Image: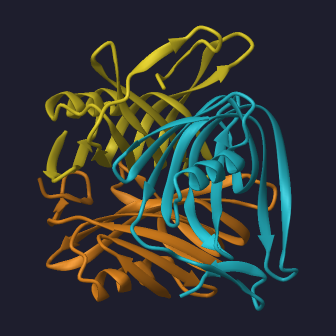
Chain colours: A yellow, B cyan, C orange
Amino acid sequence: MKYRRFGDTIIVRMDTGEEIVKETLRVAELEKVRLASVEAIGAVSEFEVGVFNMAEKKFYGNRFHGTFEIVSLLGTITEMHGKPYVHLHLSAGDETGVVFGGHLNEGIIGPVCEMTIRVLDGAVERVFDENRGINVYDF
Amino acid sequence: MKYRRFGDTIIVRMDTGEEIVKETLRVAELEKVRLASVEAIGAVSEFEVGVFNMAEKKFYGNRFHGTFEIVSLLGTITEMHGKPYVHLHLSAGDETGVVFGGHLNEGIIGPVCEMTIRVLDGAVERVFDENRGINVYDF
Amino acid sequence: MKYRRFGDTIIVRMDTGEEIVKETLRVAELEKVRLASVEAIGAVSEFEVGVFNMAEKKFYGNRFHGTFEIVSLLGTITEMHGKPYVHLHLSAGDETGVVFGGHLNEGIIGPVCEMTIRVLDGAVERVFDENRGINVYDF
C-alpha cells in the first residue's frame, strides 16, 4: 500500500494480495484520520461480504473467489473507543459482468485498488446499539 | 434521522423504518441545501427502483422485500421550481450477495443508512425536457 | 455534454448518444484537470465493461444492450505521458433490476448521465507496471 496526501484528500494504491479493510485502517492510523468518506474502484481475487439479519441481529457472510472488478467501494472512517473504525460496502462484477456485494468483511486485492479518502475536520464516535445489534453513529 | 454538519459536509444517520428519499429531502430543507452530492451505504428491508423506458418516456418500477445491504447510493440534491430536488440511484445485495438496483423511488431503512452529503457553493436548477420526458440540469 | 464549474467541483450533464469515457476526457481537457475523483449516475442504452484476467494480463469485455440505469459510476482522472487519463468502473441495473458491471470501456448514454468531478490541487502520474500488465499510480 502506498499513498499521497493532497490537502484533505488521500489518494491510495493498494496492491496484489493486500487486504482492503486492513490497509484502509492502516492509512487511517498513519494519517491520524478521525472522520472521512472513502470511495474506491479496483479488482479483487477473493472477498467476503456480509448481510445483516435484523431478526437474529447477526451478520451472515458470502464468500467469492475468482476474477472480479470492484464496481463500487463506499464507506466511512469514524472512531470507536478512541480508535479508527472502518465501515465499507463493496460490490464487484464477475467474468460475465454479474455483480455481487454487501458489507465488506474481507477483500483480497488483485491486481490493484485505487482509493480516495476525504478527511473531514471533526470526529464522529460510534456506539453499540443494543436494540439493533450494530455499531451506529453516536448522534 | 439525525445528522451533524462539519463545514460543507453533512453526516447523516437514518434509522429503521425511515424512507431514504424523504429523509434526504428533509436534510436538504433543514440545511437549506441548494446543490450537493450524496453518497451512502446501509441496509434496506424494502425498496423500489425504477428503470426509464426511453421509447415510452416512462419509468417502470421493480420492488424488492427482504434482507438487503445497500452497496451504493449515489446522487445529487439540486433545485426545481425553487424547491430541493433529490435524485438518487441505489443498488443493494440480497442474502446471497446478488445485487439489484436502479433509480430510487423508495427505500425503507433497516437497520441503518449512513449518508454523506457534500454541499456546494452554488445552485443548479432542473427543467423538464419534453423530448426525453425527464427533468435535466438546466445548463 | 454541458457543464458548470463551482470552485473545485464540476457538475456535468451528458446527453443521449454521447459516450461517457470520451466526454469525461473532454471535460478534463477543457478544464485542465490533472487529478480528480469522479462519480455519476444516469442511464445507458449500451455499454461494454471489462474484467482483467491476472494470469493472462489481459482485459476481456462484456457488452450489454437495452434499458439500463447506471447505479454506480466511480473513478478518477489522473495523468499519463502528460495527458489526462480517465479510469472509470460502472455498474447498471437492467429492466428487472439485475445489476451488471466492470471496468468501463464504453458507455452510450440514454437518456442522461449526471456526473460530479472533484478537482484536486496536485497531480498523479500513471506508469505501466510490467509485472501486472496494468497502468498504476506512480507512487
Task: Measuring from the top left, give residue B58's x and y in whole percent.
Answer: 85, 74
Seen as rendered, the residue at the extreme left is: C139
Number of marks in the rendered image: 0
Q: Answer with the quarter of the image where residue C43 lies.
A: bottom right
Task: Measuring from the top left, give residue B110's x and y in whole percent.
Answer: 70, 28
Q: Is residue A17 above or below residue B120?
A: above
Horizontal arrangement in the rendering, residue B64 relative to residue B103 (left or right): right
Task: Measuring from the top left, give residue C93's x and y in whole percent.
Answer: 69, 58
Point 45% across, 34% down: residue:
A88
Q: Is residue B60 above or below residue A74?
A: below
Q: Visible in this render: residue B91?
A: yes
Q: Is residue A112 above or below residue B3?
A: below
Seen as rendered, the residue at the extreme bottom is: B131
Q: Answer with the quarter of the image where residue B17 lies.
A: top right
Point 33% across, 49% down: residue:
B7
Task: Measuring from the top left, give residue A105's x and y in whole percent.
Answer: 46, 25
Horizontal arrangement in the rendering, residue C92 relative to residue A10 (left or right): right
Q: Visible in this render: residue A96?
A: no
Point 45% across, 46% down: residue:
B10
